[in-house]
Amino acid sequence: MSRRVRLCVLAAGLLATAALFLAACLELPRFGGDRHPYGDRAVHAALLRHTANAVSAVNFDQRALDTLGEESILFASVLGTVVLLRQTSDERRTAPAPARVTARTRRYGLLLLPVTLLIGLYVVAHGQLSPGGGFQGGVVVATAVHLLYIAVDYRALERVRPLGPYEIADAAGEAAYVLVGAGGLVAGAAYLANVLPYGTFGTLASGGTVPLLNAAVGVEVAAAVVVLLARFLGQALEIEGGDGKGSDRKGSDGKGSDRKGSPA
């Protein structure tokens, strides 16, 4: 295929896409108007299934299959990172030096760690009731773990962050979402159908399968972020080749770890 033909095919595709977007935009409700057909239907469906947070109802009920795809993208990203950044047999990692952290930084970091962890767990647990959910709360939980790196040093982070359990938790969160969805098939409905009792509106047990799927996402996201950061932080540590010449597989400048006892 010549360059001219490829450009013609590209132009035709872009024109067709632009026409579809234009047709869709012309049918959108007027901005600021009182006609919101999609929002009205989403809120009605959320209230019908006793889910106070309409956004979570959309994510984990009305379009739960799309959320499975989003969660699977993150899971695949973690899996690819683990495979690509694994340490080979002819490499060894230099242990970081002890950290020197000011007393004020240590004090406030250690104070914020349990508070941040509690907030993250709260956001996950109340995802069907208030703004937030598994994606947001999972990131907050992972952030809480890494406050130990800021308040103490990289060695302290490694002691509370064994990668094995977090990698298992990542896979377990993904599997839990898939299995909850299969429960709809067992009940004789569609995959990821909300087949559990809806419970009392405004309580933690409300929403049927929504809190279960939300919790599965929270576990997967928290563990995934921890594993991703661990792999990338590990690459910043000096990795020496088997020949002892200090060669770095990822282009280290040979300076080793910094004052914080962290990746340079």
Image (tube, helix red, strand yellow):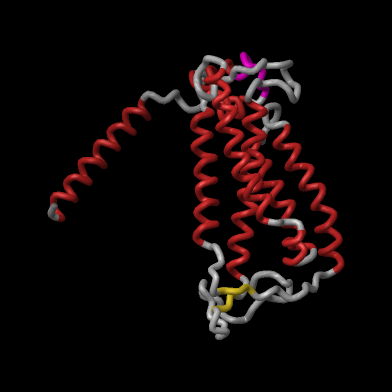
| Residue interval drawn in magenta | 46-52
Q: Position of residue 51 (x, y in %)?
A: 66, 21
Q: Position of residue 171 (x, y in %)?
A: 59, 43
Which image quarter is the C terminus in? bottom right
Q: Is residue 98 magenta?
A: no
Q: Is residue 48 magenta?
A: yes
| Depth order, front residue of 185/251 | 185
Q: Quadrant of residue 20?
A: top left
Q: Say if 32 sits above or below 45 in the image.
A: below
- Classify residue 221 as left or right of residue 201: left
| Depth order, front residue of 118/28 | 118
Q: Say if 113 sits above or below 138 in the image.
A: below
Please name the residue shown 62% across and 72% down the image: 237
| Depth order, front residue of 110/161 | 161
Which residue appears farthest toward the front when viewing the image? 89
Q: Position of residue 177 (x, y in %)?
A: 58, 33
Please name the residue shown 54% across and 46% down the image: 75
- Classify residue 250 as left or right of residue 150: left
- Callout count: 0
Q: Quadrant of residue 50?
A: top right
| Depth order, front residue of 20/49 | 49
Q: Position of residue 56 (x, y in %)?
A: 61, 29
Please name the residue shown 62% across and 31% down the image: 213
Please name the residue shown 65% across and 37% down the image: 134
